[in-house]
Image (cartoon, coloured by chain):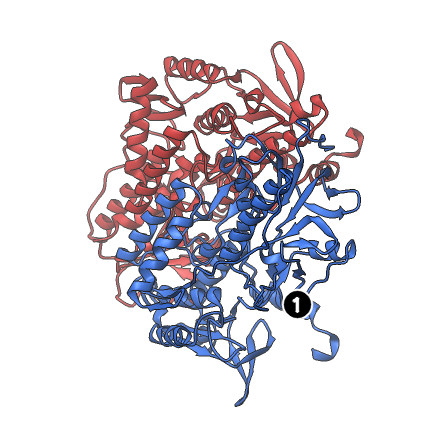
Chain colours: A red, B blue
Amino acid sequence: METTKSTSGKPRVVIIGGGFAGLNAAKSLRKAPVEVTLIDRRNFHLFQPLLYQVATGGLSPANIASPLRWVLRRQRNCEVVLAEVVGFDLEGRRVFTAEGDIPYDYLVVAAGSRHSYFGKDEWAELAPGLKTIEDATDIRGRVYSAFEHAEHEQDPQLRRARLNFVIVGGGPTGVELAGALAEIARHSLRNDFRHINPAEARIMLVEAGSRVLGGFPDDLSAKAHLSLEQLGVTVRTATMVTAITPEDVELKSAVGVERWPTRTVLWAAGVLASPLSKALTADSQAEADRAGRIMVQADTSLPGRPEVFVIGDMASYKQADGKLLPGVAQVAIQQGRYVARLIAARVKGKASEPFHYVDLGNLATIGRRSAVAQIRKLHFSGVVAWWLWLLIHLMHIVTFRNRLLVLTQWAWSYFTYDRAARLITGDVPSDADLAALQRLASPPQQR
Amino acid sequence: METTKSTSGKPRVVIIGGGFAGLNAAKSLRKAPVEVTLIDRRNFHLFQPLLYQVATGGLSPANIASPLRWVLRRQRNCEVVLAEVVGFDLEGRRVFTAEGDIPYDYLVVAAGSRHSYFGKDEWAELAPGLKTIEDATDIRGRVYSAFEHAEHEQDPQLRRARLNFVIVGGGPTGVELAGALAEIARHSLRNDFRHINPAEARIMLVEAGSRVLGGFPDDLSAKAHLSLEQLGVTVRTATMVTAITPEDVELKSAVGVERWPTRTVLWAAGVLASPLSKALTADSQAEADRAGRIMVQADTSLPGRPEVFVIGDMASYKQADGKLLPGVAQVAIQQGRYVARLIAARVKGKASEPFHYVDLGNLATIGRRSAVAQIRKLHFSGVVAWWLWLLIHLMHIVTFRNRLLVLTQWAWSYFTYDRAARLITGDVPSDADLAALQRLASPPQQR
């Protein structure tokens, strides 16, 4: 595809990524005198905060995914291109995609992040992370298969190992996964098996830092920790995962090293910016931090490239007070809207202010009627926080249809404990697959 | 797994397959003095009649799938085993599974069917059929990718080929797929693209027989044919598909041979009974027809094996009037209930009647407000048939939650034309993949 130059003569804004940052940038350029091209390799916007509910069988993928073309169908100054971006020519102002080059006048890079195994890439198969729809259906298959395998298993020790779940990372995703798994084991599957008691499943949440939900105030971290334990989750803070094998995990803390037998490890720890970050730094004076995030200017632009902006999870933005902004949806949404305003102003020859983040707060759910919320200076926990969480998440889902479907399913699950989207689909790797992978991945001396 | 013999001393009924036949057999044994084991390799019952709506992005997989354990959770005389059946010892009354042997006193085999390429197995990758959730999401990805590729394509001829869809087989699935595709092209995608007009897509339905919906009365076939053409579908009856390549299909009819350029071929033609059919005929006096269906006795049992029953799509049942029963859901449901009654009676030492099929009618939908229905001697078409179709399908969906979700989404799609579950997920094979496959599959002289 050799995309034609803007026929209208208007400046062309190319946005890479249809996540919170990119989609909000595109929508906010609705009335600007520009031509917008939104490039994504997927044909939908994904509502990431609810991805853990797909991974635990509460919602279907389509309930949290909104087709980008549908969302933007009436925005006549916007075109959606389904393509993988492979590089840039920042000097020549072109984006390279697998389908051809796309020229730009303004470029907004919002390609997000993936999970990082801190150099232990061989853990990826054993401990899947949660970033895409495919990740979520993979985890869903593994979780429900674990109970199925336990039901078959005759050996009590192996059965126990099948019912041990280890979640690495105590941020919002890890906490939400742990809470949901505890509810599945205790309630959703209560009557389903004949040879095992699913409530005997042990869910362990491992966090390297000193507390769960490190981005929250101390008192809310403590409340979340307590709520998790009340749900039956074993929470280990200040504990590192030092090895993952198909049979167990090795944990290291101040008290020593221990091995936990388990067949199901879920990864909710580090993040790493999109590989496009490397292409950007190679072609400009921009620098990246250890997680690959581009250190941007006060207006989210690249140093020396005032027409190129990096926003959302790919950007490392230092506020005037010296603090780095966290990689959360609110930052991405506000940066998307900010960049749109900035570009619209600049096209009209007007000046613009630096980006200013308005911290609206922080929310994480732990389980049924249990959440923590910080709204400016107010701290909530328990039922009130849970209602806040429900309301705010429902409001942010992109299409009315999905709002309706999610609400219906939440109400249903609330009253029945049912998690009806618990399908085991696709290929769930067998034990033999995992063992083979592990052998390939291990250096010989460890065999 | 070495499953224990029935501890209660009650006869053990093993049912293979959780489709319409097997699930209805299991549920109807609820009050019988037996122990029931339902074996399936999937953890859910699939409502096949709506699978085409998943394949066209109208519904999510979980909306038409009901977890078997959840459906049967309160039936204390029933156990669900997630396993693949690999064979039988009919003499020793055991079922072999990948997880171990399972003994039985009564065996009900209801493992269904897959699609058949009439010996042209190399067509499988080029023309996917529609039997499983994975088939449906694969087809969904191919259909929506075709429009995406057309949007990119500069060459008008290749663009045209991208927008040609060929559906092979004019039974209910083929008709329903063709109707849904026509609506997607004309309505759902109306505002979504900037370089193509999706309404220019050409949907061709190819049927080898003399009319579409061969299982319906003549007048309804004619009405369905007309409705399809009004929707813009090109219907070719009495036409055979003689070749499928990554670039086109070859069609042969009385008027001659023609080639149609297309990149998207969907297979809704032949069916073939589960491979378990071979294992059954190898170990008994039973015979199978050309589609692998086992020819069963008047009580659906195997000849010479009164304790083994074959029902649903795997069975070829000849009625007293000499007619063979069709492979439809109603036959499977009634046979499942019948076998349950028969086993319950036999356990109590009572005799039983031969199976008698009550033909309740036949339904197929063509599109929005358009369907055909035959209820006993009454024939309906148009809006009335469409309402009947909606009502009867909603009634038959297994769980209340899914009934609610399906109804919500139908209402939404009806008013908005939106098909919101149109996600391109997993791996959609690229043109290069398909060409490579084709080269592998073709004998050298054809290259």
Q: Check the image and report above or below for B312 versus B24.
A: below
* Pointer 1 chain: B
Question: In the rendered structure, which amino acid carries the disc numbered 1?
Answer: Glu
Q: Which residue is mark 1?
A: B122
Residue A292 can be seen, yes or no: no
Q: Secondary structure at mark 1?
A: helix
Q: x, y (%) of residue B85?
A: 69, 46
Horizontally, is B72 left or right of A245 in the view? Answer: left
Q: Residue at x 64, y 29 (%)?
A: A150
Above or below, A20 against A95 in this view is above
Q: Position of residue A147 (x, y in %)?
A: 59, 31
Q: Which quarter of the rendered picture does the C terminus of chain B lie within?
A: bottom right
Q: Going by the image, does A109 lie left or right of A147?
A: left
Q: Position of residue A115 (x, y in %)?
A: 52, 36
Label 1 Cα crowd, 10 Å radius (few <14 / some 14-19 / many 20+): some
Q: Closest to the observer: A36 or B74?
A: B74
Q: Nearer the viewer, residue A56 or A85?
A: A56
Up the image or down, A258 lies above or below B422; here it is above
**In screen coordinates, is B136 left or right of B306?**
left
What x and y, as percent, mark residue A131?
48, 39
Residue B388 visible within the image: yes
